[in-house]
Image: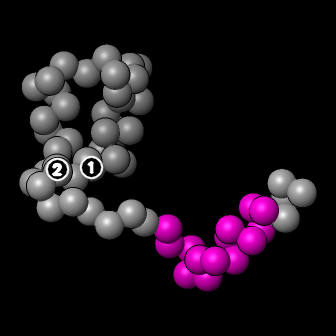
Amino acid sequence: MIRKDIEDFDNAFPDGVFAIPRNPKEPRVKVRALHDYCKAKGITPSELTEDEMKQFLEM
């Protein structure tokens, strides 16, 4: 049953893209850069300082 639900969901996005429209008032997060930075430092995103997090935000 769950497998069928997953297949139906995947088939709803034939180009493989599933996105939520961006609110222009909210910053974008550079997810890949954030991931790479945290991996290199051996930390999780929740452990970043506010200053560290700012480098991954884009208005």
For this view, does 13 lie left or right of residue 41? right
| Residue 13 x %, y % | 59, 77
**The residue stretch that appears in magenta:** 5-18
Position of residue 42 measured from the top left corner of the image (x, y, whole percent): 41, 20
Point 30% across, 45% down: residue: 33
Q: Which residue is mark 1?
A: 30
Viewer can see residue 35: yes
Q: Can residue 40 be seen at all in this image of the molecule?
A: no
> Which residue is under mark 2?
27
**Numbered circles on residues, count:** 2
Q: Residues within 10 Å of mark 1 (few under 14, many from 20)?
A: few
Vertical arrangement, residue 18 with respect to residue 31, above or below: below
36 lies left or right of 3: left
Question: What amino acid is labelled 1 in the image?
Answer: Lys
Asked if residue 27 lies left or right of residue 16, the reply is left
Amino acid type, callout 2? Pro
What percent of the width, then of the height, locates residue 14?
Answer: 61, 82
> Residue at the spot x=17%, y=44% of the render?
57
Q: Position of residue 46 (x, y in %)?
A: 34, 22
**Residue name at image x 38 percent, y 19 percent:** 43
Q: CA distance from mark 1 to mark 2?
A: 10 Å
